[in-house]
Image (cartoon, rainbow, N blue to C red):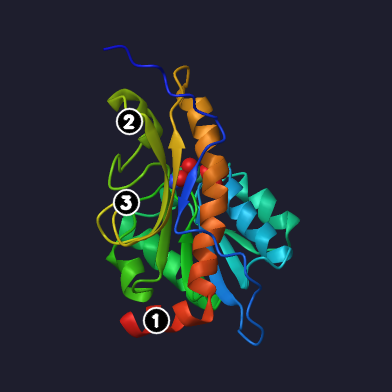
Amino acid sequence: MTTKPLSINSTTSLISPEIDNSAIAPNTPPLKLGVLASGSGSNFEVIAQAIQTQKLNARVQVLIYNNPEAKAAARAEKYGIPSILLNHRDCKNREELDTKIVKTLQEHDVEWVIMAGWMRIVTQVLFDAFPDKVVNIHPSLLPSFPGIRAVEQALKAGVKITGCTVHIACLEVDSGPILMQAAVPILPDDTAETLHARIQVQEHKIIVGAIALIAAPNCRSTLQSQS
Ligand code: GRF
């Protein structure tokens, strides 16, 4: 049997649940976020941008980064967001780093923690301080391809569709209740770089969409009563 290759538009994507662009509810206080980022910080920047343009009823109280080279810090400066370097190399173990993170987040009156490209495994120390209030973004359709090199894993497995996921984080790496996903087709000539670039376009939509879900007044109370 001969099969005709499916014609795929490289911008095709499917986001679920749909992003609700309805107006921000008046009289709802902004959701106070703490963002953790290790690298480029493009996801952090789209959050800051969405807040600045009033598409998101939130405020980034603080950006924490663990790598002195992280470009995220310069992005924070651009938006007037305080940024704090907590270098994991100065800590004897993961718990010590997380204890410092929790202290910094609490000092900045953070309600929800967003791991936007945070390349460290977090411990119970963080989850005890922010139960069910830690969000992660991952460049695959979880539960497929958790862990490092998710984009390479998808290419190697030969799947035809991959994507990205925003979920509530738990102790098991890249697991926990899924808030939003976007599917991204894999094209025949894709490299890890070209595919990751297209995934990031979708990440930037669902990270904002998922935080908007959390910030919505009805969702805030539901999530609070569950925790
Ligand atoms: C994203 O692909 C995210 O899914 C993964 O790390 C990358 C961070 O990108 N966890 P950026 O630093 O936000 O540009």
- Label 1 SS: helix
Between marks 3 and 1, how big is the CA–CA gap?
23 Å
The residue positioned 61% from the left and 67% from the top of the image is 60
Task: Name the quadrant containing residue 108.
Answer: bottom right
Residue 113 visible in the current orientation: yes
Precedes in sequence: disc 1 or disc 2: 2
The residue indicated by pointer 2 is: 153
Q: Are marks 3 and 2 in contact (CB under 8 Å)?
A: no
Residue 39 visible in the current orientation: no
The residue closer to the viewer here, 20 or 90, is 20
Residue 36 is situated, as x and y percent measured from the top left of the image, at 50, 57
Residue 42 is situated, as x and y percent measured from the top left of the image, at 60, 46
Between marks 1 and 2, how big is the CA–CA gap?
35 Å
Question: Callout 3: few (<14), some (14-19), or many (20+) C-alpha neighbours within 10 Å?
Answer: many
Question: Callout 2: few (<14), some (14-19), or many (20+) C-alpha neighbours within 10 Å?
Answer: some
Drawn side of residue 28 relative to residue 165, left or right = right
The residue positioned 32% from the left and 47% from the top of the image is 142
Amino acid type indicated by mark 2: Gln
> Farthest front residue?
1
Drawn side of residue 130 relative to residue 197, left or right = left
The residue indicated by pointer 3 is: 174
- Choose mark 3 or mark 1, whichever is in front: 1
The residue closer to the viewer here, 108 or 50, is 50
Residue 104 is situated, as x and y percent measured from the top left of the image, at 50, 70
Between marks 3 and 2, how big is the CA–CA gap?
14 Å
> Farthest top residue?
2
Precedes in sequence: disc 3 or disc 2: 2
